[in-house]
Amino acid sequence: MSSSDQQPDVVHEAAETMTDTGHTATRRGFLLGATGALAGAALFAAEAAAQQSKPGSENTVTLPPIDAATEPPLTTPGPFLAPGKRVGFAVVGLGNLSLDQILPAFGSSDYCRVTALVSGDRGKALKIAAQYGIPESNITDYAGYEKLKDMPGVDVIYIVLPNSMHHEFVLRGAKMGKHILCEKPMATSARECEDMIAAAKQANVKLMIAYRQQYEPMNQTLKKAVADGKLGKVRNIVASNSQAVGDPTQWRLNRKLAGGGCMPDVGVYCLNASRFLTDEEPDEVFAMTVQPKEDPRFKEVESRCEVLVKFPSGMTANFTSAYDTHRSTLLRLEGDTAWGELSPAFGYHGSKLHFMRLEDGKDVEMTPSIAEKDQFALEMDHMATCVLGNVPPHTPGEEGLQDHRLIEAIYKSAATGRSVKVQPPATSTRGPALPPMKG
Ligand code: NAD
């Protein structure tokens, strides 16, 4: 199957459900292209074919249609893999992200199940294990991490620890021969990322970085609009990801544990989005950081980071990230004939996609209504399909490494007050196949 066969048909879905305020046909044309309905039918066929190739497709159930052909089709979720056939995940680190997002996401997953927990707090791990039906024998602590090697049902290790611990736990995980999904930012330096990639290669295991945005349907719709030239030529990107951190003693504000402040934690979303949405790589950055040391939260790391970015095509970007403002997110791609924007942009829920273009001398706004999906379930299901099909992940270690090279250039620029040139990678840092969409 070619990579285009595997591409999700999110644009079709977006066009069919677009808010109709009198410009429906033209707006469908904007996203679907001149061939309109015919292209839609072809995309539909591609989606049906993709459905057939999904793990567990032998269990697909098709219900007779109840609506007229003019109505948007109903979709039956699945097919899901039977519990015993699912890819088993060990979750390492039971903090906020694991408890609030990742563990609940297994309930929305088609191909994954949680089979083991690694935590420094056995009491907490026992309570979580009871909630998710994990046997007590599949709980271990950080010192006993290597017990995962022989635990039944552990195929993938999902590392959800403070950033500075990713390197060690990826290396130890690869040595056990386990596939690894590692949270962003990948590490605290490009050097660590290189080690992690080498360790996974040497052990012949898959290493995927958890860039959940890249598996999310609105981002994929925006990416396809850019690739199809629907914005014209993208000239500039405006992105911002900011939030207010609290407890000054948390690891995020400790330079050694976090590797930096707002930039690697939340600024990385702006940076990664500009790269994957345009398939271009920055070649120069200019940055400024602010560190109000009188604020107990910012003794060691920056509270704000402003970045100007240039790409070889002449496209530019400007990013803001902050740890001391009310939560605020935006991602806008400004093309010469239209713009596309996610606002809000980077949260777990509630993203909204807008397009604006000139039509008959008037600005016309389009707001495709795209069903929200659990981004962690999508991302984990991608990892599972890579394991089941033995294909490389779409966001491998190389994707994380390039972000870290750029973050290092950003910090160098902020420290020297000069712009810093960066050598773009010779080949794409992303795997060839986009993730299949869930049914
Ligand atoms: P957290 O502080 O809530 O949890 C961290 C866990 O690591 C805790 O269970 C803690 O006990 C454990 N831990 C082990 N050793 C530790 C040490 N030396 N210091 C501090 N904690 C230690 O953090 P989190 O929000 O769950 O973040 C974990 C990882 O996930 C980070 O890499 C973060 O960047 C990433 N993250 C990603 C997203 C996303 O949307 N993809 C969102 C939040 C966090």
Image (spheres, rainbow, N blue to C red):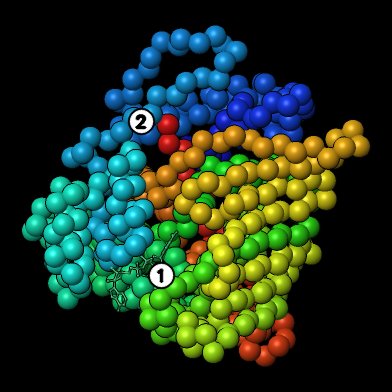
Q: Which of marks 2 and 1 is nearer the N terminus?
A: 2
* Label ID, residue 294: none
Residue 148 found in image quarter: bottom left
Distance between mark 2 and mark 1 Cα atoms? 33 Å
* Ligand 1 in which quarter: bottom left
Is 225 or 433 nearer to us in this picture?
Answer: 225
Q: Are marks 2 and 1 in contact (CB under 8 Å)?
A: no
Give the residue at x 85% y 35%.
359
Q: Is mark 2 on a helix, strand or loop?
A: loop
Image coordinates of residue 408 in percent, x first then y, are: 56, 80
Q: Residues within 10 Å of mark 2 (few under 14, many from 20)?
A: some
Mark 1 lies on a secondary structure that is: helix
Front of the two marks 2 and 1: 2
Q: In this view, does 182 lie above or below 153?
A: below
In the rendered structure, which amino acid carries the disc numbered 2? Answer: Gly
Q: Residue at x 51, y 64 (%)?
A: 399
Q: Can residue 127 be seen in this view?
A: yes
Rendered image quadrant of residue 276: bottom right
Percent from the top left, x then y, of residue 161? 33, 69
Amino acid residing under circle 1: Ile
Check the image and report above or below for 37 versus 111: above
Residue behind label 1 places its C-beta within 8 angstroms of ligand 1: no
Query: Residue 197: which numbered mark, if any?
Result: 1
Task: Report x, y in % for residue 419.
Answer: 72, 82
Farthest left residue in view: 137
* Rendered position, 82 above or below 121: above
To which quarter of the image does residue 139 belong? Answer: bottom left
Disc 2 target residue: 78
Which residue appears at 54% of the width and 55% of the height? Answer: 346
